[in-house]
């Protein structure tokens, strides 16, 4: 295992170790970040915008220059969670200094419902108010300050009604945004009836604010042909193009959406970046002026949805060894007021209710419950983490019930030969890799020696208790909506030999553009410096899927590879007949900036620039488009069975914590991670994704608490009241490594695996370790109840409860 961040000791040593980490020193030295040379797919190259990020040269939406007469927008939001709008008097708003335009529901020229998949998301309130923060009207003024001052002049009357905020109670009333879905395999009821033992429990899993550094923002320019050009911080440009066109009642081709980069997205800009673009576009077309709209942090947090909170229950049949024979799991997703993406999100929670374990004969039920909060939406993991939490809780509970170590119970329940089929009917390929990975981490992290040390420490420490846990991850890769598993790319080679690639994915800091450039460089045998990427634009690659579901590199990389291979083969065909000596077509290859044909003494090498120039002079097209659609995947919702995922990515993490059981305060002392990315496309970027994903997952389960008052108004609406992890929350010992020598068994991009979402769920080990520490209060005889986020307050209450239970 490689220690990436070990910050104890003197600061100069810490700085040296951090530098070594960035440069790839230590056991992974062969992953050294290249500063020059042939940096193609598989090498550890810097992020393509890294220098721009740290120097401030990278342009985000609020950095874009606009004309001097550009308008700025502020929004009027509902102060109540549920009610009827009885009066909206905007007379004083329209008369305010600097105000140019004011729009409401009635000024929308086209569609007024902008639900991304199912209807239910009005662009403005007409009459019914469904959550505190819902948009009532928009003001455009000559300055942002003028617009914000004018918003406050509105006279608003609302017949306030009680808000539904309890998803469990709403489920009992059958108040859903979408129908309940069920997945069943085998006779689960018989498994329970004939069980040697039954273990059951429930768990509340809290939501999470996206807290991207760049908030929701867009700039919209009107065009001369009655259309608009939209610059937006957005994970799904094609959907925004569609919705803006429908709202304006114009053809799709009249709307161009461009995204160069985002300052973070995490799913919060997959659907919920579109409303602001639609509002700005309406004003731009009405006034003929460029419009800028960006949400202040507090408004952003109140107006947009979060990760879905879940209320989960399980009842499982186990044998004397703690091996699951069957049972039932129910997940209740708190969807907020509208469907948004909740159907697919709760589906994925159901798909991942097994995590890495065979459930046997099982039924999984998923409810999509309506409450009067902002419509909850995509967030890294897309429901998968919430589903996994209930089975990880069950593993700890089973271990305490039968008196075994939780790791032993987990390993006994892993998918294995003879138990390789999920509850939704997909065979788990590469299942043995899960065993290999966990056993490797178990050994490299000295799990059993540390387990003894932890137990010995706890036996003599009445207040401070240590906890240790190793948890696995099995995450399915693909959009569960089949049609989204497609991508396109457009490749241009210019006559100086430089290459430009464009694709449908968007860059939100995750390194997607870097990997795509590396793919093209590899296919064309070029140095990475020869390849540049352009902003994602709907007029270059149309009808694109969102950059989500960890599929950005898988889909767009394959499309870029397709385009590059088409161009390469075209150049080979040309070279074989053009050059006088005649070149061996079958043996041609592009490498080190050369076209190489033949071997040994008959080898011929033609520089890339010469090849391109010659092809151009002979009227050979130097542009190509690529396309890719993921094969094999399917899912029949009518029977809850199919193969929704092309492959699975695996990982595991060990966390050690120290808990003050009187105050509930705790610290994470050490974390060890081993993660499966197949044959890595870029180890430097992939390790960064693993590190960041883990920390974000840890924050979700420990410190990030969303709070609403009893009237449904979000009160954790800024960094003063909502606590994301900081540098100080990093474990002093943080060991991270990529599993090597195990390429993807499926025909993925260079046998790599996705790395965007799976590492997020590695954070579960911290929560499990906290439970382990609390369980030591009863000599590991009782499994504590610990909802998430496991804040110090919750940990203290859990400690008090388990002490009382032990009496």
Image: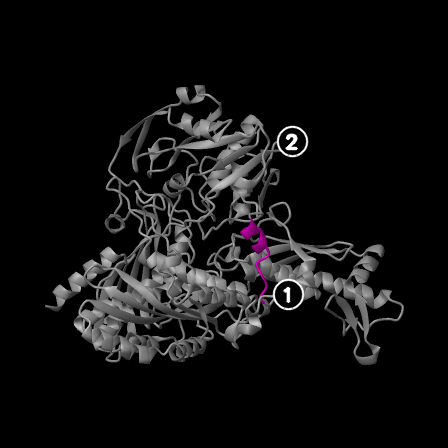
- Apparent side of residue 529 relative to residue 715 in the rendered image (left or right): right
Q: For this view, does 251 lie left or right of residue 491?
A: left
Q: CA distance from mark 1 to mark 2?
A: 43 Å
**Residue at horizontal 51 percent and vertical 74 percent from the top:** 26
* Residue sitting farthest toward the right: 580
Q: Name above or below for residue 262 compared with residue 411.
A: above
Nearer to the camera, 677 or 176:
677
Q: Magenta stretch?
A: 44-55
As drawn, the label of residue 224 is 2
Q: Residues within 10 Å of mark 2 (few under 14, many from 20)?
A: few
Quadrant hosting residue 394: bottom left
Q: Is residue 416 above or below residue 100?
A: below
Disc ID at residue 435? none
Q: Please tell me how crowded label 1 is: few (under 14), some (14-19), or many (20+) other residues with Cα within 10 Å.
A: many
Disc 1 to disc 2: CB gap under 8 Å: no
Q: Which residue is mark 1?
A: 39
In the picture as drawn, the residue positioned furthest to the left comes out as 807
Residue 203 appearing in the image: yes
Residue 622, percent across and down? 75, 56
Residue 253 x/y as whole percent: 62, 40
Which mark sits nearer the N-terminus, 1 or 2?
A: 1
Regarding mark 1 in the picture, which secondary structure is present there? loop
Q: Quadrant of the N terminus?
A: bottom left
Q: Is residue 401 magenta?
A: no
51 in the magenta segment: yes
Residue 352 appears in view: no
Q: Residue at x 24, y 61 (%)?
A: 786
């Amino acid at each position: 295992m490689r220690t990436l961040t070990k910050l104890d000791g003197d600061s100069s040593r810490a700085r040296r170790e951090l530098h070594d980490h960035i440069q790839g020193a230590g056991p992974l030295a062969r992953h050294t970040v290249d500063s020059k040379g042939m940096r193609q797919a598989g090498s550890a190259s810097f992020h393509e915008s890294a220098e721009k990020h740290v120097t401030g040269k990278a342009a985000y939406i609020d950095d874009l220059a606009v004309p001097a007469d550009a308008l700025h927008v502020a929004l009027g939001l509902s102060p109540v969670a549920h009610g009827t709008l009885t009066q909206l008097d905007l007379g004083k708003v329209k008369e305010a200094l600097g105000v140019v335009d004011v729009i409401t529901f009635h000024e929308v020229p086209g569609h007024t419902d902008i639900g991304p998949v199912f209807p239910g998301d009005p662009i403005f309130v007409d009459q019914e108010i469904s959550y505190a923060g819902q948009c009532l009207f928009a003001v455009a003024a000559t300055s942002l300050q003028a617009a914000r001052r004018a918003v406050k002049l509105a006279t608003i009357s609302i017949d306030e009604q009680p808000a539904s905020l309890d998803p469990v109670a709403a489920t009992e009333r059958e108040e859903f945004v979408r129908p309940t879905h069920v997945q069943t395999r085998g006779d689960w009821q018989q498994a329970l009836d004939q069980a040697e033992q039954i273990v059951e429990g429930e768990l509340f899993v809290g939501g999470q604010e996206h807290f991207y550094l760049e908030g929701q923002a867009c700039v919209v320019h009107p065009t001369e042909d009655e259309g608009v050009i939209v610059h937006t911080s957005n994970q799904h440009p094609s959907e925004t193009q569609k919705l803006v066109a429908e709202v304006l009642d114009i053809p799709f081709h009249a709307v161009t959406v461009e995204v160069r980069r985002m300052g973070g997205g995490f799913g919060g800009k997959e659907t919920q970046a579109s409303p602001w673009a639609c509002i700005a576009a309406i004003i731009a077309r009405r006034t003929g002026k460029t419009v800028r709209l960006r949400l202040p942090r507090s408004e952003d947090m109140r107006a947009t949805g979060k990760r879905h909170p879940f209320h989960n229950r399980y009842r499982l049949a186990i044998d004397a060894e703690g091996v699951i024979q069957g049972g039932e799991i129910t997940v209740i997703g708190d969807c907020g007021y509208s469907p948004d993406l909740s159907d697919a999100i709760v589906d994925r929670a159901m798909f991942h209710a097994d995590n890495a374990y065979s459930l046997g004969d099982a039924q999984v039920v998923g409810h999509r419950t309506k409450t009067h909060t902002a419509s909850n939406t995509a967030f890294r993991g897309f429901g998968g983490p919430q589903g996994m939490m209930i089975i990880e809780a069950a593993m700890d509970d089973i271990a305490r019930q039968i008196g075994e170590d939780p790791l032993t119970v987990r390993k006994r329940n892993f998918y294995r030969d003879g138990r390789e089929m999920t509850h939704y009917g997909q065979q788990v390929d590469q299942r043995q890799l899960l065993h290999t990975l966990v056993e490797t981490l178990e050994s490299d992290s000295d799990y059993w020696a540390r387990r003894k040390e932890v137990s010995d420490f706890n036996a003599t420490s009445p207040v401070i208790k240590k906890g240790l846990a190793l948890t696995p991850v099995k995450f399915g890769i693909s959009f569960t909506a089949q049609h989204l598993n497609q991508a396109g790319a457009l490749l241009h080679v210019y006559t100086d030999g430089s290459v430009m690639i464009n694709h449908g994915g968007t860059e939100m800091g995750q390194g997607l553009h870097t990997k795509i450039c590396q793919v093209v460089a590899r296919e064309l045998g070029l140095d990475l410096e020869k390849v540049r990427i352009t902003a994602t634009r709907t007029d270059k690659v149309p009808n694109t899927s969102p950059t989500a579901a960890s599929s950005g590199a898988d889909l767009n990389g394959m499309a870029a590879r397709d385009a590059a291979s088409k161009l390469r083969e075209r150049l080979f065909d040309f070279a074989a007949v053009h050059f006088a000596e005649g070149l061996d077509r079958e043996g041609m290859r592009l490498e080190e900036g050369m076209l190489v044909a033949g071997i040994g003494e008959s080898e011929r090498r033609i520089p890339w620039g010469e090849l391109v120039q010659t092809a151009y002079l002979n009227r050979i097209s130097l542009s190509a488009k690529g396309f890719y659609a993921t094969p094999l995947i399917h899912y029949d919702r009518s029977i809850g069975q199919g193969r929704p995922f092309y492959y699975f990515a695996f990982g595991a993490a060990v966390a050690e914590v120290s808990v003050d059981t009187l105050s509930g305060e705790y610290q994470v002392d050490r974390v060890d991670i081993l993660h499966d990315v197949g044959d890595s496309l870029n180890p430097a970027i992939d390790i960064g994704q693993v590190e960041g994903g883990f920390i974000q997952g840890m924050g979700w389960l420990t410190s990030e608490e969303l709070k609403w008052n009893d009237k449904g108004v979000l009160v954790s609406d800024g960094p003063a009241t909502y606590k994301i992890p900081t540098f100080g929350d990093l474990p002093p010992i943080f060991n991270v490594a990529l599993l090597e020598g195990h390429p993807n068994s499926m025909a993925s991009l260079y046998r790599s695996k996705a790395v965007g979402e799976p590492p997020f769920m590695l954070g579960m080990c911290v929560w499990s370790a906290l439970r382990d520490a609390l369980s030591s209060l009863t000599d590991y005889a009782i499994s504590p109840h610990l909802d998430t986020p496991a804040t110090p307050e919750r940990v203290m209450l859990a400690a008090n409860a388990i002490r009382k239970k032990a009496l």
